[in-house]
Image (cartoon, rainbow, N blue to C red):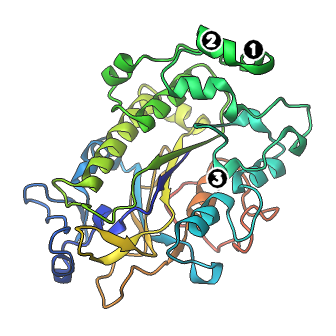
Amino acid sequence: MVVNLVGGLDGLSLLVPFADRTYAARRPGLAVASPGDRYGAIDLGRGLGLHPALQPLYELAGRSDRLAVIGGVGVPDDQGGNRNHLPSREFVHRGGRQQSEGWATRLLRFEGMGPEAVWSFGDGPHPMFDGLSSGHVGGGVGPIRPVTVGAQAACAGVPLGAPTAAAAAPDAALDDIRWSDARWSSPADRLARGYPEGHLGRCLATIVDMRRSDAGLRLVGIDHAGYDTHVDQGDGRSGVLAHKLDRLARALAAFWSEVSRGRDVEARRDDPVTVVVVSEFGRAIDENGSGGTEHGRGGVALAIGDQVVGGVHGDLPSMADDEVWPVGVDVRRVLADAAASHGFRPWRGAVFPGLSLPNRSLGLLLSP
């Protein structure tokens, strides 16, 4: 599952270089406090910390070494990396420059799989599935499922098969969904299960319900908006980013708790779950005059899952004289490693054009 943080996540608030004295000097109103202080970072060792809003996720996944924090992630310079939202976001979704379809579409085509293996939420397919259609695979698969009314109704909290959804379903599309008898949760039920209110919590709870109904999902795409923090970004205590990260952490923690509960080692090996959290770029090192940050380059990605090797990976944050954190890890490497750990072959068929097969993985995901 890929969760895209739309707007550009500030990596230096997520992975906090608290031991670097210039960190607080360059961010006098935004710097997250050191571990041990009130609203201080969660100590990860080596002078690095995690934003305190991620505590619920760290308690569940981090302490069991199933939470990876990858630094310096972004669109490389030689791939046209810049600080503009649209081209950077398209690169992440399409897996390369000037591609007309999503990277996941190419991956599914070369694996001989179709729309029945994917799910996304919203008014249309997630951009990583752009171009996916029944014409890409054999077997006469039906219409793309991510855009059926069932997906929209489920994420909105409407029970699948309710009169409002059924009446709007074209050509009895709901009849084609194998998990049509799933028991979609109510808002009260989701809250009782630990999910926060909002789009992300609804979507993740729905994915758990679909897994319980044996939906056969392999790839899921979700957007979580609101990370373009030019104004009132905040620190570890308050502000826009602390609020967004709190929702993110509680939603992912509830999801991970449900999918991992009661499963032994063998079950996790046979049916692993990996969540990758990415953003189109990071933020500038210095805070601006509006209590926020401008667009940057390198940022931070997260990986949570059964096969994840926890800890800090990639490039460590540096508070040198640079204006931005340089990109040291191609964002496609994170996506490709996650796909490879589930038995996909992302290095073939130009799934990620221009991304060479590495001598080794990033070390954050185990082989299947």
Spatial separation of the CA atoms under disc 3 and disc 1: 30 Å
The mark total stands at 3
Asked if disc 3 and disc 1 are in contact, CB closer than 8 Å, the reply is no
Going by the numbered disc 3, the residue's amino acid type is Ala
Q: Name the residue rendered at 16%, 81% in the picture.
A: 25
Q: Name the residue rendered at 26%, 61% in the picture.
A: 233
Residue pointed to by mark 3: 339
Residue pointed to by mark 1: 175
Q: Quick one: which residue is furthest to the top in this view?
A: 163
- Crowdedness of circle 2 by 10 Å Cα count: few (<14), some, many (20+)? many
Residue pointed to by mark 2: 161
Earlier-in-chain disc, 3 versus 1? 1
Going by the numbered disc 2, the residue's amino acid type is Gly
105 with respect to 218 (left or right)? right
Which of 155/326 is in front? 155
The quadrant holding residue 95 is bottom right
Inspect this view and state whether residue 307 appears: no
Which of 368/40 is in front? 40
Secondary element at image label 1: helix
Going by the numbered disc 1, the residue's amino acid type is Asp
Asked if disc 3 and disc 2 are in contact, CB closer than 8 Å, the reply is no
Which of 264/79 is in front? 79
49 with respect to 264 (left or right)? left
202 with respect to 135 (left or right)? left
